[in-house]
Image (cartoon, helix red, strand yellow):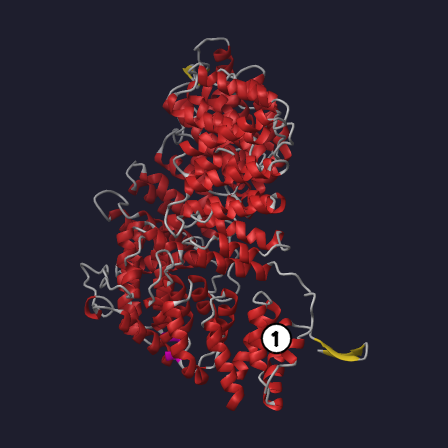
Amino acid sequence: MVAGTADGRSNVHFFHQTLFEYAAGRCLVRLAAEKKQSYFGALGRHLAAHPDDHLRAVVAEQALVQGMRAKGRVRDDAEELLTGLLGSEDVDLQVIAVRACALLPDDLYGDIRAVFHRYLREQASPAMVREVLALLPTREHTDPGRVAEDLGVVLKRDSRAGARMEWRVLDVLCRFGRLDGRTADVVWTFLRELCADPARCLRREPEPQDAAPGGCGGAHCLWSWLVNLNSNSASSHGNQAVRLVEALAEHRGEWTAARMRELLALAERHRSRPQVLQCVAVIRRRAGDPEWDALFPVAARIAQRLGTDRALPAEGGEEPKASAGAWGARTPVEEWRQAQAALDAHWFAAALSAPDRSSPGDVIRALAAEGKSPFDVPNPRLRAVLGRVGTLLRETADGVPGLLEETVALCEGRDTVDGIAVSLLPPLLREPADAPGTRAAAAWCAARLDVVGTRGGRGLRTGSPELRFAVAGLAQLPPARLTEIVPWPAKGGRWKDDRIDDTFLALDGATKLLVPLAAAGHARAVVALERWRTLEGLRHEQLARGRNAWPEFRGARPYHGPRNRDGMAGVIQAAFADHAPQAHRLVMEALRARVPTADVPWLAALAKRTVEQPGPAAAPARALFDRFGPDLAEWCAGLWDGTPCPDPNARTAALRLWGDLVRMGAADRPPLAVQARLASTVRNRRWSTACTVLRHWNGHEVSSVAAVGGEPGWEELDAALGSALASAAVPEASAGEVALLRSLLRCRFAPLGTREEVAAAVDTVAGQVRLSADTAAIHDSGAGFLTERLCEFDPGRAVGVALEVARRTAGSGLADPHHVTRLGWKWQKPLTRLAATADRKDWLRLIGGLADGPQAMLQKALDTAAARRREEDVRADAARELAASPYRDVAMAGLRDAAVRHRRTPLEERLWPAVLRPAGA
């Protein structure tokens, strides 16, 4: 605070809003006590006259809380004002009282409790209930029963459909229940009182053969409601059942352990890997408690059956690392990783616990003997145990090559050899490379590769199990580490084509090592990639000439078939997509050679993965496309607009790549005239891809809506699409998609300079909206974009388009389903433009038209009005237009929140003369 004088008056400046609110509220209570005057009466009259005076409202909250602490007349006046505000019909006045009641100390709450609970049951809107639940955890309550009573009233109130408060109540309970033993007992008692049949629900002893809970089915039972949620609902809210059990575990160990057993069975019934990992994390944190320790083997069996390791996203830096402690997870995914690490450690410890398993070799032999065939072990446990074995072998001085030979032999030539190598070799061969076991394993792998491609009859042959094992494991290593192990010199004379083919261009050879080595600049691999592109180029040339001839390789074999070209291209192109973001030379070589069938498919797959993967994990790939995007787009354009590509799959991949390059901002958007030429060449099954790409090129992320005169080239593009529809060139399955695309393009780019052009656009989009089967199709019709454009010169027509959309999406009930809510968010910009441009008559027509929903659009409209139409009495207008609306209460509550967010500061009138000079004693 800073005190001073100005213009003959003393003044105090507060550096913090909360401090000002507290001091001002205390000042009013003190004046009321000292001067024996009805300051609370004057405050009530001021608030009734100015319900939207939010600066005084927050001070009134503090004055009421402190006034309830006083004695005598001051206390009576504060209680009278509090009761009067609760009974008011004005939402702004109600919220002052609701906040004050929620903040009252527990010893002062008793006198007002009955009035407050009656208000919650009979009068409070869902927004008011949410306000109470948000405020209850913000202060330390001395009486836990008070919080439980409030929560019970909230749950048992006759709420309307869609206004359920279970999630918010559970959030309060989870934070409240972990405070101490007393609060945990209150929470448990609260849960028991809500349960209709505790013996069958809350106190049920789970049976091993039927542990999944069913609940009691009681109308207010929180536990029954939780365990009967579907998997998506439970996971999307952070698995509140697990949170609740953990919150009470410190003080209700036996009961919470039984409930956790039920939740594990429920996760298995749902087949939900994230739910299992959430349970495992809590069980691990309770390590040392015998009742909880008994649950870990149960959780491990379920995790093994479901394969929880597949729930983890790929490592890529997308999650922040834990800052402190082994279990200091800061994100859900980080907690899942820690839980999976605990499962891996448990499986490995179990593998070593048997009396006959004292060494890594014993563990491998036991795994191989398990089941009906070699290594017939669930993948999660096999991966975890072999990974730990590989780590142990790093420090083993002797016997590593022999154990690797034995492991390969135990696979008995089955495909299992690849999976065993992928799990065992990477942790054994990773950096640092100076460990004795690591050096021995690297030498063994190099010896297996040394004879690949030789036809002299010595050593291993291509396709041997040892070679396959070594290649599968080495392919998982970073390229730099791989170059240190392979036996082929990076420099030297050029190999003959036959040796290149037998070494790298054979699926049973070292094909999996080709791209990683080339990414590291290994000369042999670079030459081999050139050879592969030459073969692909020769095939491309034959197709361009209209021939079906195939080039020869590997001793005059034809370069085709699933074991040769198809399988090899799949391996090489998948590796390209993995390594190119860190090795730009791979894209440079692709642009130099320009063989569509070789490189366009993997570039398209990488671009799609990049544009759909937000966050730091996609940063290297985005940098790659930022560098080469224009050149790649030019190549794609040539495959469509220049010399057409004869391979239809490569040509379609080029179109997808071009579309994603523009979408991520790595290449310029083609003009509409170019798009029209492209559309005129699309045939048959390619229309679905073409529509997706054209939509990407003309979406709001890439292009802005046109001015009144439209964008050049729209007529040509619209004519090309119309001609395709009329000539039956578009398959029936894609006709609706093309029609939606035409509507979008008209809304965004068609000229709107005449009445006829405006009418044509409005009629087109209205027809598409009426035909739309879901909100996604409504959005894709372009109605929102047309509304934005019409706001500039004809807001009345814009209101008509908005109401057409509202009529089509309304009628889904008082609680908008998720897809309707999402449409409301997408309409934020059009509604903002309407709020700024529509006159009062059109604006009132919009609000009145939205009275029947959808709720999301109505609330967005009112929110923008609070910010953009401050010169009007938005609140009174909304109350009048929504008088008969089923959304009235929630809309008015939302409008109050919007008024707080968008209020003007500072207020024009900074003093409180009517309050500081109350009338009457």
Residue 712: x percent and y percent?
Answer: 64, 23
**Whether residue 898 is situated above or below residue 615 in the rendered picture:** below
Q: Determine whether, in the image, residue 896 is placed left or right of residue 631.
A: left
Helix, strand or loop for disc 1: helix
Task: Name the amino acid type tagged 1.
Answer: Glu
Residue 464: x percent and y percent?
Answer: 36, 32
In magenta stretch: residue 147? yes
For image coordinates 58% across by 77% down, the residue present is 43
Q: Determine whether, in the image, residue 124 is placed left or right of residue 918.
A: left
From which residue to which does the magenta span run? Answer: 144-148
In which quadrant of the rendered view does residue 162 lie? bottom left
Residue 170: x percent and y percent?
Answer: 38, 66
Q: Main secondary structure of the magenta part?
A: helix
For image coordinates 29% across by 36% down, the residue present is 414
Which of the image's four quarters has the N terminus? bottom right
| Pointer 1 residue | 21
**Whether residue 231 is situated above or below residue 187 in the rendered picture:** above
Asked whether residue 800 appears in the rendered view, the answer is: yes
For image coordinates 59% across by 60% down, the residue present is 901
Residue 853: x percent and y percent?
Answer: 43, 47
**Whether residue 660 is situated above or below residue 236 in the rendered picture:** above
In which quadrant of the rendered view does residue 416 lie? top left
